[in-house]
Amino acid sequence: MTNKTYLIFGISKGLGKVLTQTIPADRDKVYGISRSKPAYLETHKNVEWISADLSNPSQSSEQLKKHIGQNTIDYLIYNVGIWENNGFSNDYKFEDTPKDEIVNMVNTNISSCILAIQAFIENLKKAENAKIILIGSTWALDNHNGKEVTFSATKFALRGITHSLRENLRDYNIGVAVLNIGTLATKPGFKESGDSIIEKTNGGIPLQDVIRAVKFILSTSGATCVKEINMPAMKDSNI
């Protein structure tokens, strides 16, 4: 089987960490992006860590392109999504959100995404069956009842990027998909059983389910167009 090259953003913790640990095979090459180097990479020798500050989109995209150069990229996974300091709590008020926080969220969640993908289009064109997967949120779905304005705005924008980018890359058979995830159970880890995770988190989505969804997208042929997968938790009531 041909070795693959991954470019995965947000590998330091949570879903990004699990994707890096479980999706690529040992023989595959992984460029892993995060601000600080995760300790678990000591046991994952196929991951080449690259430090990047995604709150500075122009600088980070240029830095990453310089590091990776013209090497082929088979799969690009953008798993980045910061939210308001008081987001998802009773203390959140849009009118109290600092301007700097809003700008930082837009830069990190969206501007860096656009510039990073633009920087690696030629790398993706070299692959036989390239895929781009953007990790979104159910806060991007129509008529959700979440209050977090900037987080929601950036996740809606992520869907827009996906739909328009697909039309730019259709002639090259580069698949572009967005995975809109609901309440995710990240604390128990991915080695516990799904039933145990569901019980401990009162119905949070097990990481194993997201891994299966990503593997499904990556396994499809160039003849198939997976546009969007919505994955709310069964107990999510915001959509």
Image (cartoon, rainbow, N blue to C red):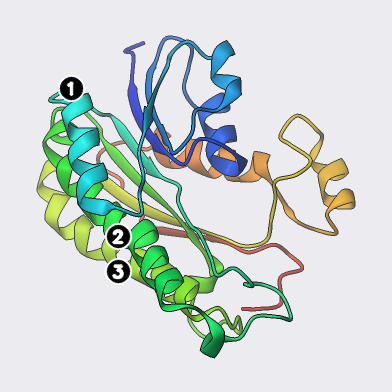
The numbered disc on residue 162 is: 2
- Check the picture and name the quadrant holding the C terminus: bottom right
Kindly identify which residue carries mark 1.
71
Circle 2/circle 3 CB separation < 8 Å: yes
Residue at image position (58%, 12%) is 43
Q: At which x and y percent is residue 167?
A: 16, 59
Q: Secondary structure at mark 1?
A: loop
- Residue 24 shown left or right of residue 114 in the figure: right
Whole-number angstrom distance, CA of label 2 to CA of label 1: 23 Å
Q: Secondary structure at mark 2?
A: helix
- Check the picture and name the quadrant holding the N terminus: top left
Kindly identify which residue carries mark 3.
160
Q: At which x and y percent is residue 149?
A: 49, 81
- Residue 239 shown left or right of residue 187 in the figure: left
Whether residue 155 appears in this view of the structure is yes
The extreme bottom residue here reads 95
Whole-number angstrom distance, CA of label 2 to CA of label 3: 5 Å
